Amino acid sequence: MSDEITFQIEQLNFYYGNTQALCDVNMTVLPREITALIGPSGCGKSTFLRCLNRMNDTITDTRISGSIVLNGQNIYAPNIDETELRRQVGLVFQRPNPFPQSIFDNVAFGPRVLGIATGNDLHELVVQSLRAAALWDEIKEDLKQPALSLSLGQQQRLCIARVLAVTPDVILMDEPCSALDPIATNQIEELIQELKEHYTIVIVTHNMQQAARVSDKTGFFWLGELIEFDETTTIFTRPSLQRTEDYVTGRFG
Amino acid sequence: MDNIQTRATLDEHLKGIMDDIIRLSSKVDTAIDKSINAFAACDVELAQEVIAEDVHINTKRFELEEHCLHIMVTQQPVAVDLRLIVATMNIVTELERIGDYAAGIAKLAVRVEMVPKRDIPNAIYQLTSQCRDMLRRAMVAYTEHDANLAYDVADNDDSLDTQHRMLFHKLVGETRDASQSTDYLLSVLFVAHNIERIGDRATNIAERVIFMASGKLTELNVTYTDDK
């Protein structure tokens, strides 16, 4: 593991209008680590995740203070190209959201828009992305079939392939398995472990067993604060704070 | 949310295993007491009772382990709950072994029945009383989630070891006295050894309580049994 830091988040505050959603959050995300964010609904974990690639910028009447430094660069600096940022930091949503196009076109969409590859190179990039997303063997016979004809689990892996096709550094996942059955969930979890070799992953999940299974570090959010952030094993065996223990053991309050 | 008891089923299960293990430790404690009395009085009937009870202790141990596995599978406990269950599974094994030591003493009582009777050394009673006290306090520490009390229990083990060593040398000396029954002295030595081992097991229980209460895995009073 390299000593270099992927994300350095300092004193991060975020507001929806007058409502403060994040309070003084500090976190360090290391390269090729999986960081899980847990906490009750409305605790700020998804808001935090969306700050990491400025997806919250699309919401009106929001404010942010503090800093998020990605590989040495403050992502909220005025000169930042948001499209390039979102190429570097991809987001996989809760529900699979493929475009109503073919499998191939879904994965090729990003590289085409960004001008990353064309022709045979593009074809090769699509194949590689589908392989990396562990979907290739299931769909290789017909890349022209509509993406929406795939099962939900396959669609979610397609969405991951779509993110991989633009060669990101970081993959953000916002409850990526909440719409999936246990088998599809297992496939995504195994995939996350494989992706860890090349990518830094931050995942929001309501499923604490999932956080325990897939992540290296876990952050517990509550009322917009990052209450505790530590090795996942520590969080689930001997958390430092009673509030964390109450939450992970299901005795919140 | 404060008023909703969110893990009532898990809490009920945890209370169940805690109650069961306390009951089991009480059975084991009684077995120690009875085994020493059976040995001292060459009371075969009482010794047979201890040996029969050991079978129940072994069965209870597996039942408790099954219950712990059931909780893990159905409730997916973490943090303090997981530590309680893991500690309980370790402690129940220690209790089962203590039961075996008591049964071992009881079996000796059956065997020495034909040997001429004589009073057993007072030191045996003292050792027994001390190791039973350690066991009881280790189980109180378990019930109370009290790591400090668990550390105290382990501190007592040093004194138990010292007394055992003194008794060992005294008895070995006595075996050189031709007027003493070597069979009987060896039996007393074996009894003393078992009691000392019970103290070690109580210390192991204390270690598990410390893990349960604090999450810290620690080895207390490292002993080298073979050197004793």
Image: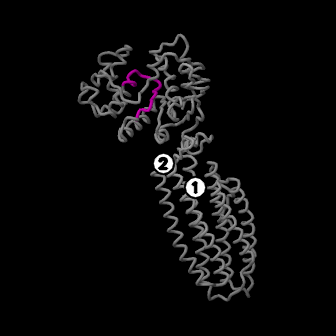
Co-location on one chain, circles 1 and 2: yes
Point out residue A168 in the picture as x, y percentages from the top left corner. 44, 23
Residue under label 1: B87
Point out residue A104 in the picture as x, y percentages from the top left corner. 29, 23
Specify the quadrant of the image occupied by residue B127.
bottom right
Specify the quadrant of the image occupied by residue B116.
bottom right
Residue A234 visible, this orientation: no
**Vertical position of residue A93 compared to residue A246: above or below:** above
Q: Which residue is drawn at the image coordinates 72% and 66% (left, top)?
A: B160
| Image depth: mark 1 or mark 2 in front | 2
Q: Which of B147 and B117 lies nearest the eye of the viewer? A: B147
Q: Quadrant of the C terminus of chain A?
A: top right
Q: CA distance from mark 1 to mark 2?
A: 16 Å
Q: Which of B36 and A93 lies nearest the eye of the viewer? A: A93
Q: Which mark is residue B76?
A: 2
Range drawn in magenta = A162-177
